[in-house]
C-alpha cells in the first residue's frame, strides 16, 4: 500500500505531503486541484509502463506539467513510501526540464529492506522502473504497484462513447479506464468466474429494478466482435447499450469495476466522480462497494457528492483547496472536529467549510 506521497513542482501542486490509507475520498471545489493529483498518478503509471515520454507529449509538454511552467519551475520531485510484506520501500525521483519541452530523470532512487539495500540512477530519459533488465527486488516491487495503479472515469456516455460500440471480444485482460471493453470483460467473467458475474448482475438489479441480465454473445456476422446487449425484467426484450440511460450505463461500469474478482483488482484504484448520474438511493450501495474493494486494494475517489461523503469517516476524507496560487491537501481527524460531529453530518460540515484548514 502507498502510505505517503510528497509532490513538488507538479501542475498546481507547489509542495505538498499527502498521507494515504486504504480508502481516500478527495473533495474540493472545481479547480482546486483534485484532477492534478489524479494526473500525477497517471504519470507514475507511465513511468512503470515505459510510456513516460509519451505521457509528457499527451499532457502538452513539460511546460504544462511544471508548476506555473518552466519559467518558474525547472524541476519536479516525487517521493513515495510503500508498506509491503518485506517492510517499507521508498521511491524518490527528481525530474529536470530539458530541450524540446520535455523532462528527464536527473536522479532516481529506490530503498527497501536491508537485503535489497538501495539503488540509484541518474541522467535517464525514462524511469528505471521501465528497465526490464533491473533485478533489484525493491525496483521490481515498486514497479508491480505503480504499473497496477489505474485511473477510471466513466463520464462519456455520448452516442460515440466506446462503451456503446462493438468491441473486440478478446479485449478482456483487464477492464479499461473508460469501460470501453465492458461487454468483452463481462462475457469473460460469465464464462470463467460465473459467481462474480452473478454477483455483479444481482447488484445492478438492486440499483436498476428494470434490469434483468446481460445478453452477451459473439456477433454472428463477426465472431470477434461483441456489444453490450441487455434485457428487461418484465418484457424480456433485448436492448442495446444506446437504449440505456446514462446513469444506468455508469452503474454497470462502476459495479463491474468494484465487484470484479479480487485478483483482477488494480493495486491502486483511482475513480473520478463515481457518483455521476446515480440516483441518491444508489449512493449507499456505491459506498458499500468502495469499502468492499478496499479490502483487497487501495482506493482513491474524487467526488462532488455530499450524499456520498456522508458514508465515510473524517479520517478517510482529503480536502483539496486552492486559496491562492497552489493546491493544498488537508485532513481533519475526529478529534479536530470534536463536537461538530455530534450535531452535523460530514456533508453539512463540508458545506460549512469546517472540513477545510483549521
Image (cartoon, rainbow, N blue to C red):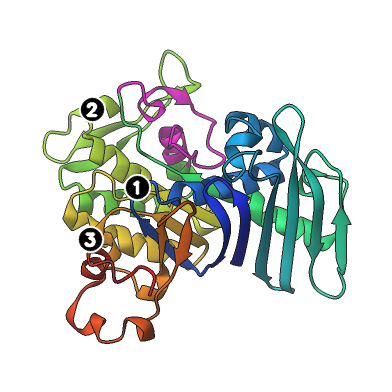
Q: CA distance from mark 2 to mark 3?
A: 31 Å
Determine crowd level at label 2: few under 14, some 14-19, many 20+ residues with C-alpha closer than 10 A. some
Q: Residue at x 54, y 45 (%)?
A: 39
Answer yes or no: is residue 194 visible: no
Instruction: Check if mark 1's residue and mark 2's residue have beta carbons within 8 Å.
Output: no
Please tell me whether mark 1 sits on a helix, a strand or a loop.
loop
What is the spatial separation of the Cα atoms under label 3 and label 1, in whole angstroms? Answer: 17 Å
Q: Assign the N terminus to one quadrant of the image.
A: bottom right
Dot 1 crowding, Cα within 10 Å, few <14, some 14–19, many 20+: few
Lateral position of residue 177 relative to residue 164, left or right:
right
**Can residue 212 be found in the magenta stretch?**
no
Residue 145, percent across and down?
65, 56
Which is closer to the viewer, label 2 or label 3?
3
Q: Quadrant of residue 68?
A: top right
Residue 308 percent coordinates (x, y)? 27, 60
| Rendering coords of residue 95 (x, y %) | 74, 47
Residue 67 x %, y %: 59, 46
Which mark sits nearer the N-terminus, 3 or 1? 1
Q: Nearer the viewer, mark 1 or mark 2?
A: 1
Magenta-drawn segment: 159-188
Looking at the image, which residue is at 21% across and 51% down?
Answer: 207
Write down the residue under mark 3.
Answer: 307
179 within the magenta span: yes
Give the mark nearest the N terminus, 1 or 2: 1
From the viewer's perspective, is the residue at label 3 or at label 1 nearer?
Answer: 1
Identify the disc placed on residue 239. Answer: 2
Give the residue pinned by disc 1. 30
Amino acid at each position: 500500500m502507498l502510505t505517503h506521497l510528497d509532490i513538488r513542482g507538479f501542475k498546481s501542486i507547489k509542495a505538498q505531503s499527502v498521507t494515504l490509507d486504504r480508502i481516500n475520498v478527495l473533495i474540493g471545489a472545481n479547480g482546486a486541484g483534485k484532477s492534478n493529483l489524479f494526473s500525477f498518478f497517471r504519470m507514475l503509471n507511465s513511468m512503470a509502463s515505459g510510456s513516460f515520454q509519451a505521457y509528457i507529449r499527451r499532457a502538452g509538454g513539460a511546460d504544462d506539467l511544471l508548476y506555473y511552467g518552466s519559467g518558474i519551475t525547472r524541476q519536479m520531485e516525487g517521493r513515495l513510501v510503500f508498506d509491503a510484506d518485506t517492510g517499507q520501500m521508498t521511491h524518490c525521483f527528481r525530474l529536470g526540464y530539458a530541450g524540446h519541452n520535455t523532462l528527464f530523470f536527473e536522479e532516481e532512487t529506490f530503498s527497501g529492506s536491508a537485503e535489497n539495500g538501495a539503488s540509484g540512477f541518474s541522467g535517464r530519459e525514462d524511469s528505471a522502473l521501465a528497465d526490464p533488465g533491473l533485478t533489484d527486488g525493491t525496483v521490481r516491487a515498486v514497479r508491480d504497484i505503480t504499473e497496477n495503479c489505474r485511473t477510471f472515469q466513466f463520464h462519456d456516455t455520448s452516442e460515440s462513447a466506446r462503451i456503446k460500440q462493438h468491441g473486440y471480444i478478446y479485449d478482456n485482460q483487464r477492464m479499461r479506464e473508460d469501460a470501453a471493453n465492458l461487454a468483452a470483460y463481462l462475457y469473460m467473467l460469465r464464462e470463467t468466474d460465473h459467481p462474480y458475474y452473478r454477483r455483479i448482475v444481482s447488484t445492478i438489479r438492486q440499483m436498476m429494478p428494470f434490469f434483468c441480465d446481460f445478453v452477451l454473445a459473439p456477433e454472428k456476422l463477426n465472431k470477434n466482435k461483441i456489444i453490450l446487449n441487455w434485457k428487461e425484467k418484465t418484457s424480456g426484450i433485448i436492448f442495446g447499450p444506446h437504449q440505456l440511460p446514462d446513469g444506468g450505463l455508469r452503474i454497470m461500469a462502476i459495479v463491474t469495476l468494484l465487484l470484479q474478482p479480487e485478483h483482477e483488482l488494480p493495486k491502486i484504484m483511482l475513480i473520478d466522480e463515481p457518483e455521476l448520474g446515480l440516483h441518491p438511493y444508489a449512493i449507499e450501495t456505491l459506498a458499500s462497494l468502495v469499502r468492499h474493494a478496499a479490502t483487497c486494494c487501495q482506493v482513491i475517489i474524487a467526488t462532488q457528492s455530499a450524499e456520498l461523503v456522508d458514508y465515510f469517516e473524517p479520517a478517510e476524507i482529503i480536502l483539496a483547496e486552492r486559496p491562492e496560487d497552489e493546491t493544498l491537501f488537508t485532513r481533519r481527524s475526529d478529534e479536530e472536529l470534536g463536537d461538530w460531529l455530534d450535531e452535523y453530518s460530514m456533508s453539512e460540515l463540508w458545506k460549512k467549510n469546517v472540513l477545510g484548514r483549521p
